[in-house]
Image (tube, rainbow, N blue to C red):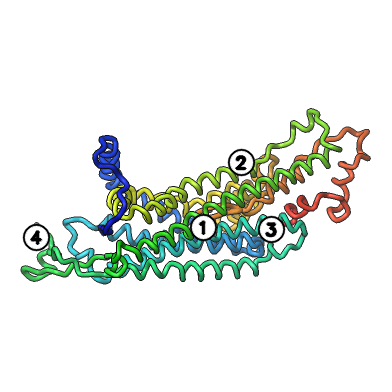
């Protein structure tokens, strides 16, 4: 689908040698990568649909489904599964099976209708996962701020309402993208069976079919593509830029909050945090490192698309002709990768998830082995759910809680009456543990 907008600003200076070399490099890359793109995407889609299906099954078990974050992650998995299932059909029909030797017309009206619906579903479902990731990060931040054991932000009922609200709003905001496109008859050619004769028995002699294509409506490209550009700005800012900004902001706030709680915990357990060799034996904050890795993956997959969405609203013709045409496959690949990593991240971060997963899938003997290995100190023994997204961030409170249980220093016998040792013996309701620590320890993740 070629785009041309009257009086459109030029992104590239074609008089420059460096510009021509850059565009030539993009074109060369597209020619080299295109033949393998379909096979890579098929593998990713199959893996993503399968793992997201398992993800839904595990997260809806009785021991997991009462968590607000796990409830939202179930919605994220369903959205990712829908995205990858739709893309799997698209890649099979329009990339893998579309060859000059094919005995069927790949560009019928109904296949163009599917392509239009696929585009709408991809935008809607993928955007929903981004905003659900924002919702999870916000709910986790409010849970830490509330500092109560039964905060309403931990309730699955609230999470379900948020999921329906996010999906409903995104569907409404995605409708303009559907409305600015239409299905048209392709006027320059008609489909004919291959001339090598291997399809002759299927069609009469001189058989032809109408070809269809998807184009931007005439009203959308009128007046310098004003309506089309308005839709690009709307989708680029609301669907990419704002979610990225909010996730960076909330993730930074969460890491700051956890570090403050960690300092209070260390100070409390070590009688004022006096520096000694025991302090150094405390495990590092594995949660913060994992959260940074998750945010990095998210930014790598989503920020480039957000930047291109803004450029597309300014330099519409050049971005469509030179950037999206050559890098569109890579952008699709990044989105698919983002949709298929949540299962892996959950397995890495949450021992409760691993135990639930292996109890459903693995034999009892192997499950016990995995459970014993996962519960060892330093292996994320009692890690909980995940703070995550699609694109995805993952809930991370139980890594902090596990350190509260496992990282207590060994006190000499003569100090058994110390306050820190009494905390180990007293019930959590009697011990004067900081509220932020209590919240992390009692989340149902």
Q: Which residue is mark 3?
A: 142
Q: Which residue is mark 4?
A: 197
Give the image quarter of residue 218: bottom left
Q: CA distance from mark 3 to mark 1?
A: 19 Å
Q: Nearer the viewer, mark 1 or mark 4?
A: 1
Q: Nearer the viewer, mark 2 or mark 4?
A: 2
Q: Nearer the viewer, mark 3 or mark 2?
A: 3
Horizontal and vertical percent position of residue 222: 29, 66
Label 3 vs 1, first from the N-terminus? 1
Q: Which residue is mark 2?
A: 289
Q: CA distance from mark 2 to mark 4?
A: 61 Å
Dot 3 lies on which element?
A: helix
Q: CA distance from mark 3 to mark 2?
A: 21 Å
Position of the N terminus, as image quadrant, is: bottom left
Please determine whether, in this image, residue 14 is positioned above or below residue 205. above
Dot 4 lies on which element?
A: loop
């Amino acid at each position: 689908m070629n785009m041309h907008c009257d009086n459109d600003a030029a992104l590239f200076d074609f008089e420059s040698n460096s510009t021509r070399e850059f565009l030539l490099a993009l074109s060369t890359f597209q020619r080299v990568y295109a033949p393998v793109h379909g096979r890579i995407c098929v593998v990713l889609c199959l893996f993503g649909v399968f793992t997201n299906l398992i993800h839904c099954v595990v997260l809806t078990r009785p021991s997991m489904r009462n968590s607000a974050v796990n409830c939202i992650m179930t919605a994220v998995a369903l959205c990712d599964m829908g995205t990858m299932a739709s893309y799997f059909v698209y890649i099979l029909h329009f990339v893998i099976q579309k060859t000059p030797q094919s005995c069927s017309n790949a560009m019928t009206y109904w296949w163009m209708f599917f392509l239009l619906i696929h585009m709408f579903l991809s935008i809607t479902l993928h955007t929903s996962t981004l905003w659900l990731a924002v919702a999870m990060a916000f709910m986790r931040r409010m849970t830490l701020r509330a500092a109560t054991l039964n905060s309403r932000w931990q309730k699955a009922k609230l999470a379900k309402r948020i999921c329906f609200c996010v999906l409903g709003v995104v569907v409404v905001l995605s409708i303009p993208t559907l409305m600015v496109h239409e299905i048209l008859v392709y006027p320059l050619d008609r489909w004919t069976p291959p001339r090598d004769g291997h399809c002759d028995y299927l069609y009469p002699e001189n058989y032809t079919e109408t070809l269809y294509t998807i184009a931007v409506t005439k009203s959308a490209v009128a007046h310098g593509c004003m309506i089309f550009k308005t839709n690009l700005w709307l989708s680029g800012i609301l669907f990419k830029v704002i979610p990225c900004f909010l996730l960076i902001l909330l993730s930074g706030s969460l890491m700051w909050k956890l570090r403050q709680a960690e300092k209070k915990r260390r100070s409390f357990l070590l009688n004022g945090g006096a520096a000694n060799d025991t302090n150094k034996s405390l495990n590092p904050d594995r949660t913060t490192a994992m959260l940074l890795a998750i945010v990095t993956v998210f930014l790598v997959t989503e920020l480039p698309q957000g930047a291109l969405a803004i450029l597309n609203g300014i330099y519409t013709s050049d971005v469509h002709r030179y950037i999206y045409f050559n890098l569109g496959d890579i952008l699709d690949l990044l989105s698919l990768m983002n949709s298929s990593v949540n299962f892996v991240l959950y397995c890495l971060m949450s021992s409760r998830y691993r135990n639930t997963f292996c109890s459903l899938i693995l034999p009892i003997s192997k499950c016990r082995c995995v459970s014993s290995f996962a519960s060892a100190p330093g292996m994320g023994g009692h890690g909980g759910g995940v703070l995550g997204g699609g694109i995805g961030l993952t809930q991370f409170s139980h890594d902090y809680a596990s350190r509260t249980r496992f990282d207590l220093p060994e006190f000499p016998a003569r100090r058994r009456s110390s306050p820190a040792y009494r905390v180990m013996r007293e019930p959590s309701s009697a011990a004067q543990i900081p509220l932020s620590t209590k919240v992390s320890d009692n989340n149902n993740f």
